[in-house]
């Protein structure tokens, strides 16, 4: 998958060192996890989990993002098929059968922040979800205090749906404000595309 400035390719075992560097940055992981994983843990646990998604759900999965010029590793983008439930998105299980709903995810190196890469990649993944994979809805979630990630979701066309509170064994600072969930229906995305990227008030309302 190509964007204006990035090449998104399937994640492989060769990306272990890149992920160690990415996940080893406390600022990158500020809203995600306190645990710093070793190279062995990345190779034996994280990479197999990410690459398994491609095998189980062709067309979906996790893509390493590299600069088209120079090939610098920037991070990753993901699209995981999920089964919707009343509980928080972070606890939704993988999809069963033909995927209709997919969770958008992304994680970028600090050197790529503030340069529009996250929005560029998120928009490309959302476009692929609706045009190539026939997904009915794209969802995403983050901590309520993670304003940067929330802006990316909004710029990719997703709209705020609700705030949920999740019990964590080792809560991060800011957890008390909850997790926010964003959603985008394919029909609303298509309407936005016809309107030059603008959604009217009716189209922006999430489903009940």
Image: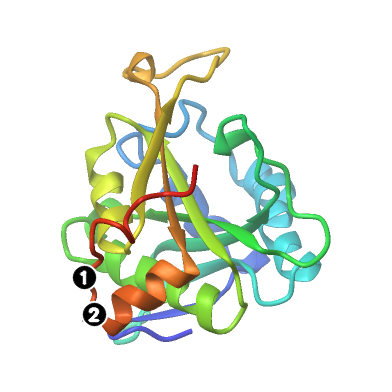
Work out whether 173 lies above or below 2: above
Q: Which residue is mark 1?
A: 198
Residue 170 coordinates in the image, percent (x, y)? 52, 13
Q: Residue at x 57, y 36 (%)?
A: 90
Residue 14 coordinates in the image, percent (x, y)? 61, 68
Is residue 66 in sight in this rendering? no
Work out whether 166 lies above or below 61: above
Within the image, what quadrant is residue 174 found in?
top left
Q: Residue furthest front?
A: 202
Looking at the rendered structure, the secondary structure element under dot 2 is loop
Mark linked to residue 155: none
Looking at the rendered structure, the secondary structure element under dot 1 is loop
Q: Residue at x 23, y 63 (%)?
A: 200
Q: Which residue is mark 2?
A: 195
Residue 141 coordinates in the image, percent (x, y)? 44, 42
Image marks 1 and 2: residues in contact by CB distance under 8 Å? yes
Residue 172 coordinates in the image, percent (x, y)? 40, 19
Q: Residue at x 60, y 70 (%)?
A: 135
């Amino acid at each position: 998958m190509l964007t204006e400035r990035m090449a998104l390719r399937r994640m492989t075992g060769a990306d272990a060192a890149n992920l160690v560097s990415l996940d080893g940055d406390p600022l990158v992981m500020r809203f995600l996890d306190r645990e710093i994983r070793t190279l062995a843990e990345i190779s034996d646990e994280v990479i197999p989990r990410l690459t398994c998604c491609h095998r189980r759900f062709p067309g979906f999965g996790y893509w390493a993002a590299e600069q088209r010029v120079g090939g610098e590793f920037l991070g990753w983008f993901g699209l995981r098929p999920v089964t919707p439930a009343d509980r928080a998105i972070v606890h939704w299980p993988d999809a069963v059968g033909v995927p209709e709903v997919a969770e958008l995810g992304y994680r970028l190196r600090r050197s790529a922040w503030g340069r529009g890469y996250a929005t560029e990649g998120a928009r490309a993944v959302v476009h692929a979800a609706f045009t190539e994979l026939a997904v009915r809805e794209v969802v995403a979630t983050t901590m309520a205090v993670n304003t940067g990630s929330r802006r990316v979701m909004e710029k990719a066309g997703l709209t705020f749906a609700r705030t949920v509170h999740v019990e964590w064994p080792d809560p991060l600072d800011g957890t008390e404000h909850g997790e926010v969930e964003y959603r985008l229906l394919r029909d609303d995305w298509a309407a936005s595309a016809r309107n030059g990227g603008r959604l009217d008030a009716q189209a922006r309302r999430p489903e009940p």
